[in-house]
Amino acid sequence: MDLNKFREESKNRSKQNKKFLSSLKNKNPRLLDDGFHQLHDEVFEEIDCLECANCCKTTSPIFRDKDIERLASHFRIKPGEFIEKYLHLDSDNDYVLNSAPCPFLGVDNYCTVYEARPKACREYPHTDRKKMTGILSLTYKNTLVCPAVLEIVERIKKIL
């Protein structure tokens, strides 16, 4: 996975993708979901996240209370200790990681807390969720982070 090439490609297609995804808000929600879900499955047959891990290298998930409790339990520490060591509140008042790359990302791109990972990580990149019309702006942002999302969007352009 050539992340430099991906970054350049995603940046070059940024304006076009933003406009395209914005135009999908008026599409039939069920057809949009079906298209995204089919392409999600196809693309993830071809792309191995462990070869990339750009999401873990560049962004932070939002940590909800349940995530913090689960991870604190995983480390056998109190939730407050977990927050103090790894998290801070962002401008939206959400808990996010203090730094990137994720401190739980191993050198082999495996997540060292995989079974206890946050819900946002479990659901990423969100291209198989229901009601895609509600997260098209997030999908756009993810085209700049995830090569699979960029590929899904490029393919959906061809079928819609």
Image (cartoon, grey):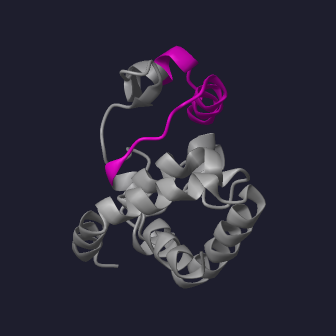
Q: Position of residue 28 (x, y in %)?
A: 72, 59
Can residue 111 be seen by looking at this rendering? no
- Side of 111 relative to 65 (left or right): left
Which residue occupies 41% across, 70% down?
Answer: 147
Which residue occupies 62% across, 32% down?
Answer: 67
User: Is 126 or 48 nearer to us in this picture?
Assistant: 126
Q: Quadrant of the N terminus?
A: bottom left
Q: Is residue 92 above or below residue 98?
A: above
Residues in magenta?
58-82
Q: Position of residue 29 (x, y in %)?
A: 72, 56
Which residue occupies 59% across, 52% down?
Answer: 25
Can residue 104 be seen by looking at this rendering? yes
Residue 157 on the magenta segment: no
Outermost residue, right side: 30
Residue 80 on the magenta segment: yes
- Side of 31 relative to 100 (left or right): right
Q: Is residue 19 above or below residue 92?
A: below
- Side of 88 relative to 136 (left or right): left
Which residue occupies 65% across, 32% down?
Answer: 70
User: Is 84 or 137 nearer to us in this picture?
Assistant: 137
Q: Quadrant of the C terminus?
A: bottom right
- Residue 57 falls in which quadrant of the image? bottom left
Q: Position of residue 55 (x, y in %)?
A: 41, 55
Outermost residue, top side: 80
Q: Position of residue 13 (x, y in %)?
A: 31, 68
Q: Main secondary structure of the magenta part?
A: helix
